Image (cartoon, grey):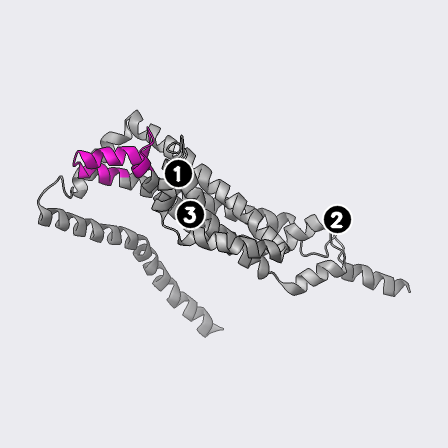
């Protein structure tokens, strides 16, 4: 007892020392790469080819107070975000259908593989050949990049559900909605969260790349292309920082929503498939019948 208490007391100062070090580490990593960036800018010696971190920060500060930046952010966010949300919803639906019917899985598998393997530029060119394709370019490109990931990951999550829990739900004739909230969704949600974390970054990268090629008016991609024509690397890098920040913010918000959804399921889903509205499980009712007999 005494030795355990002494060990905990000795470990406490060590944990306190590691706390500040862990908090400072990200700042040190960021400072290291800023130094590398600055050294690269000095080595190039031409600000229009590789702007320094100070120049980019100054230009970013100027853009933050303009309607140009927020208008472009709103334009791109609406289209890329819309394509991402549509891909998640369609991917969940196609995965559920493929899990329920093998013929659907057989028909969808080559299409999903083709979309996943095809170059992004192929879809961009095809869309630009259509009337009005430039306006929907970012949304469709983001949709096509995210859809195969969500479909494959959610399908794997459905297939990895606990078979014993499913059999128990069938034996006790658990209602479909009850089984969905107590077994299916909690089992698949971690897979969906992983696919969304990967997909949100791909959606932003593919969407902005499509905008740079298609040049829809008022988009981030159009601003980056104009900066490239004028050899303004500070503007190109400033808009890149904006895209990275939007991607990280979208991922953080998505993780927050998924974690809250998981917590809500944990509090409202009950203790298992056999839980009824009165709070008595099938085992308790069976015991009561035996006692009564």
Image coordinates for residue 3, horizontal then vertical, percent: 44, 74
Sequence order check, earlier mark of 1 and 2: 1
Q: Residue, x 86% and y 62% (percent of image)? A: 289
> Mark 3 or 1, which is nearer the eye?
1
Specify start and end residues of the magenta stretch as a single range: 211-239
Q: Secondary structure at mark 1?
A: helix
Callout 3: helix, strand or loop? helix
The tag earlier along the polypeptide, 2 or 3, is: 3
Residue at x 29%, y 52% (from the top left corner): 26
Q: Disc number at residue 73?
A: none
Say whether residue 195 is left or right of residue 10. Answer: right
| Residue occupied by mark 1 | 127
Q: Earlier in the sequence, mark 3 or mark 1?
A: 1
At x 35%, y 64%, the residue is 14
Image position, residue 172 (x, y; %): 76, 58
Q: Circle 3 sits on which residue?
A: 145
Work out whether residue 58 or residue 236 is closer to the camera in this orientation and state it: 236
Q: Are marks 2 and 3 in contact (CB under 8 Å)?
A: no
Q: CA distance from mark 1 to mark 2?
A: 52 Å
Q: Position of residue 10 (x, y in %)?
A: 38, 67
Q: Specify whether residue 246 is in view.
A: no
Residue denoted by label 2 = 277
Give the dominant element type of the magenta stretch: helix, strand or loop. Answer: helix
Marks 3 and 1, how far apart at CA: 14 Å
- When asked about the image quadrant of residue 271, the answer is bottom right
Residue 283: x and y, percent? 77, 62
């Amino acid at each position: 007892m005494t030795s355990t208490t002494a060990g905990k007391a000795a470990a406490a100062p060590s944990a306190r020392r590691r706390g500040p070090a862990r908090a400072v580490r990200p700042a040190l990593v960021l400072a290291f790469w800023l130094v590398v960036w600055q050294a690269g800018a000095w080595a190039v010696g031409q600000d229009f080819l590789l702007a320094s971190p100070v120049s980019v920060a100054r230009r970013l500060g100027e853009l933050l107070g303009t309607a140009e930046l927020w208008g472009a952010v709103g334009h791109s966010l609406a289209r890329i975000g819309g394509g991402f949300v549509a891909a998640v919803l369609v991917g969940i639906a196609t995965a559920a259908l493929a899990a329920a019917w093998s013929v659907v899985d057989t028909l969808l598998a080559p299409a999903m593989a083709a979309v996943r393997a095809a170059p992004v530029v192929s879809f961009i060119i095809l869309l630009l050949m259509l009337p009005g394709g430039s306006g929907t370019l970012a949304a469709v490109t983001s949709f096509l990049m995210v859809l195969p990931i969500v479909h494959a990951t959610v399908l794997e999550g459905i297939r990895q559900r606990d078979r014993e829990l499913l059999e128990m739900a069938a034996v006790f004739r658990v209602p479909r909605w009850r089984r969905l909230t107590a077994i299916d969704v909690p089992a698949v949600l971690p897979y969906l969260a992983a696919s969304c974390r990967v997909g949100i970054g791909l959606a932003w990268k593919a969407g902005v790349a499509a905008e740079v090629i298609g040049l829809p008016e008022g988009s981030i991609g159009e601003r980056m292309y104009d900066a490239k024509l004028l050899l303004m690397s500070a503007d190109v890098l400033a808009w890149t920082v904006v895209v990275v920040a939007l991607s990280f913010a979208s991922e953080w918000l998505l993780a927050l929503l998924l974690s809250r959804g998981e917590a809500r399921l944990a509090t409202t889903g009950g203790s298992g498939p056999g839980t009824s509205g009165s709070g008595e499980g099938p085992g308790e009712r069976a015991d009561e019948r035996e006692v009564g007999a």
